[in-house]
Amino acid sequence: MLDWLRRDPRAAPTIEIAGRSLPIEVRRLDRARRMTMRLAPDGSTVRISMPRWGGTAEALAFARSRRDWLERQLVALPAPVTVQSGSPLMLLGRPIELRHQATSRRRPILEDGVLHVGGAEASLAPRLRRWLQERAIEHITRDLGQYCATAGVPVPRLALSNARRRWGSCAADGAIRINWRLIMAPDFVRRSVVAHEVAHLLHFDHSPAFHASLASLFEGDLAAANAWLKREGRGLYQPFG
């Protein structure tokens, strides 16, 4: 039964998967016509979207009925990676090698597929994250400018996102946010997300007009880009969480 309700009516429901107790995050959406479920990229949460009228007990029953699917998704997640010398990293869809030497310069320098970085090993992860975010700003700013010019719209405010739920977003005021981890993906994947958000500057919905605009803006294969994110997207959360 719903033991979590008896313990604390305010507590989030949970489900036991592969020996782990995962919270179930329920989102009720006006536009939702059915219940959908996915696992957070880091495997920390089960996320269910449902119509506004749906009940929490119904969402929990839905998750339990698909326990085997959730377990397969959880087992398939990439193993945690420790950032250290020799760790493989990805930049623009290509592998680069991390080479750490404490006496080298603290700021990372990329030469011939090797990323040289000095300083304390304990601070490698945050410094590499900042370096990747700087590369993300450079590339995404260029992508955004190109697509806005094609669409004939002003370049909006851009910010990097650390979102767990989506790769990009466009606010009602036109501000665009793009997940910085896309700098690790191939160019066509990152650019597909930027083009998607620029298309929202023309059509703030997912209507046929929006999809037509996106198809005219993006020069690549949208289906291939979406398939890559579905297949490889979770790996972009390693090793930085």
Image: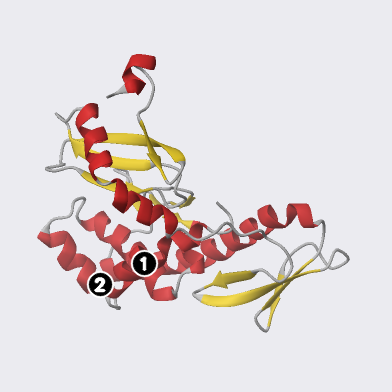
**As displayed, is residue 16 above or below residue 80?**
above
Name the residue carrying label 1: 231
Q: Which image quadrant for residue 195?
A: bottom left
Q: Residue at x 45, y 58 (%)?
A: 77
Determine whether the residue tagged by mark 2 lies in a helix, strand or loop.
helix
In percent of width and height, residue 57 lies at: 23, 28
Report how many numbered discs are placed on residues in the image: 2
| Depth order, front residue of 132/204 | 132
Q: Residue at x 38, y 75 (%)?
A: 188
Q: Is residue 73 visible?
A: yes
Q: Which image quadrant for residue 219?
A: bottom left
- What amino acid does circle 2 point to? Ala
Q: Residues within 10 Å of mark 1 (few under 14, many from 20)?
A: few
- What amino acid does circle 1 point to? Arg
Q: Residue at x 58, y 55 (%)?
A: 240
Q: Which mark is residue 223?
A: 2
Determine whether the residue tagged by mark 1 lies in a helix, strand or loop.
helix
In percent of width and height, residue 237 lies at: 50, 57
